[in-house]
């Protein structure tokens, strides 16, 4: 009898775990205002760790990572849950489980002018039996799972890549290679794959007739041509002497959705100097509108599958990878997590609601005119309401 009540109490505790993880984003659902401190801290920390392993383009999606952490915390034992809590800046607060699941869905629910696909899937080794309660949580969070024979590497890679192609409607055709599994496949038991695709129309279109190849200064020794697009618009702009950078807000057609670009003033500046101050970058407030001549890359931005295992470990989350008994509510037999992969594709082109060349309603006012030419590495983030959907660095390779 005591064992039965202990198990019930543990189940209730796991529900509270998920709800606490939810709070850091639940306070971000109001009208656009300042980004929450916890959100900035988590996003900044995750980006710093992810970017440390990448020389060129890098991008992370903080909400997607929090969903993964929430599920791991739910399935974890007391020590694992405490480890995730202490490393992730989660405040002590509870809400209803249904609200938590609903909020996860709302983060990625955009209007018709934007397309955002977020897919999570857990792959378990052949013979593993998943916990029945966890199945319900996975269903509510729109996370699927599958049982797979990891020993057949080629089949495993092909199977996962096929799921990605189908789910993204061929937007992302390939994520994993045999090399991603070769070093651990004999011990493979549990892998998580997260895939995201994002495309949205601008509020004001870029002039496709003015799109052309222009010089991009990766550094003072490496200069190459990429496609750049151009427009003029009234929007929020800031010059920060403290950060030695320019800030620009590019609104999408959907009112509560925008992209922010942060460009170092000097073409030869090391973008990592700006990344070291990413918290300050995200907390900058753009209060004044200007008439801006905008020139930015036209890009199909993709990271080729970030392995988040090292990132999570740097974050202080190691038990799930090191201990087979770190999960109390995952299933049987006991297993440890091998890898967490995330791939993101963002497509930005000239498409917009208002045709290029159309005068802004404020263009006739006495606004200062400025120029924003993103012809060297810059940072960016996509903001939906008060949530950071994506945070990244644009620093392409010469092709």
Image (cartoon, helix red, strand yellow):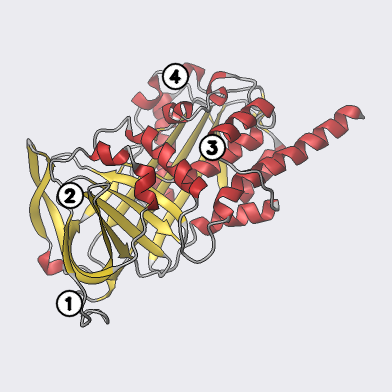
Tell me the element at label 2: loop
Dot 3 corresponds to which residue?
Answer: 88
241 lies left or right of 101: left
Dot 1 corresponds to which residue?
Answer: 357
Question: Nearer the observer, disc 4 or disc 3?
Answer: 3
The residue lying at 54 percent from left, 19 percent from top is: 322
- Sequence order check, earlier mark of 3 and 1: 3
- Sequence order check, earlier mark of 2 and 1: 2
- Quarter assignment of residue 393: top left
Question: Nearer the observer, disc 4 or disc 1?
Answer: 1
Measuring from the top left, give residue 158's x and y in whole percent: 39, 35
Dot 4 corresponds to which residue?
Answer: 184
Question: Nearer the observer, disc 2 or disc 4?
Answer: 2
- Sequence order check, earlier mark of 4 and 1: 4
Q: Nearer the viewer, residue 322 or 244?
A: 244
Q: How many other residues sit within 10 Å of disc 3, few (<14), some (14-19) or many (≥20)?
A: many
Measuring from the top left, give residue 77's x and y in whole percent: 68, 28
Tell me the element at label 1: loop
Measuring from the top left, give residue 161's x and y in whole percent: 39, 39
Dot 2 corresponds to which residue?
Answer: 265
**Image quadrant containing the N terminus:** top right
- Sequence order check, earlier mark of 4 and 3: 3
In this rendering, the answer to whether 359 lies above or below 41 is below
Between the residue at mark 2 and the residue at mark 1, the CA separation in whole angstroms equals 27 Å
In this rendering, the answer to whether 13 lies above or below 312 is below
- Sequence order check, earlier mark of 3 and 2: 3
Between the residue at mark 3 and the residue at mark 2, the CA separation in whole angstroms equals 33 Å
- Quarter assignment of residue 85: top right
In this rendering, the answer to whether 378 lies above or below 366 is above
Between the residue at mark 2 and the residue at mark 4, the CA separation in whole angstroms equals 44 Å
| Extreme residue in the front direction | 242
């Amino acid at each position: 009898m005591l064992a039965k009540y202990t198990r019930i109490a543990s189940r209730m505790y796991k529900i509270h775990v998920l709800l606490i993880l939810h709070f850091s984003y639940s306070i971000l659902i109001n009208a656009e205002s300042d980004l929450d401190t916890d959100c900035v801290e988590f996003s900044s920390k995750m980006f710093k760790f992810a970017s440390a392993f990448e020389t060129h383009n890098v991008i992370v999606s903080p909400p997607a990572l929090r969903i993964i952490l929430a599920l791991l915390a739910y399935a974890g034992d007391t020590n694992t849950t405490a480890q995730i809590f202490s490393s992730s800046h989660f405040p002590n607060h509870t809400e209803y489980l249904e609200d938590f699941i609903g909020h996860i869905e709302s983060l990625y629910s955009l209007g018709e002018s934007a397309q955002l696909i977020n897919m999570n899937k857990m792959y378990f080794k052949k013979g593993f039996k998943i916990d029945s309660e966890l199945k319900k949580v996975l269903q509510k969070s729109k996370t699927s799972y599958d049982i797979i024979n990891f020993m057949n590497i080629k089949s495993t890679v092909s199977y996962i890549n096929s799921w990605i192609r189908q789910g993204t409607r061929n937007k992302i055709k390939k994520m994993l290679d045999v090399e991603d599994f070769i070093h651990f496949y004999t011990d493979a038991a549990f892998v998580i794959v997260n895939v995201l695709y994002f495309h949205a129309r601008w509020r004001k279109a870029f002039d496709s007739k003015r799109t052309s190849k222009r010089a991009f200064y990766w550094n003072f020794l490496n200069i190459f041509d990429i496609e750049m697009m151009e427009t003029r618009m009234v929007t929020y702009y800031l010059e920060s002497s403290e950060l030695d950078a320019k800030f620009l807000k590019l609104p999408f057609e959907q009112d509560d959705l925008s992209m922010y670009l942060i460009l170092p003033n000097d073409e030869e500046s090391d973008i990592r100097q700006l990344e070291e101050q990413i918290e300050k970058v995200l907390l900058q407030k753009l209060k004044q509108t200007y008439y801006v001549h905008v020139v930015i890359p036209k890009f199909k931005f993709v990271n080729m599958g970030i392995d988040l295992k090292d990132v999570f470990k740097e974050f202080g989350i190691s038990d799930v990878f090191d201990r087979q008994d770190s999960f109390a509510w995952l299933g049987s037999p006991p297993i440890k997590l091998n890898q967490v992969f995330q791939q993101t594709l963002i497509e930005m082109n000239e498409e917009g609601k208002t045709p290029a060349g159309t005068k802004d309603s404020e263009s006739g006012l006495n606004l200062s005119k400025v120029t924003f030419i993103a012809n060297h590495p810059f940072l960016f983030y996509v903001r939906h309401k008060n949530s950071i959907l994506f945070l990244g660095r644009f620093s392409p390779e010469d092709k």
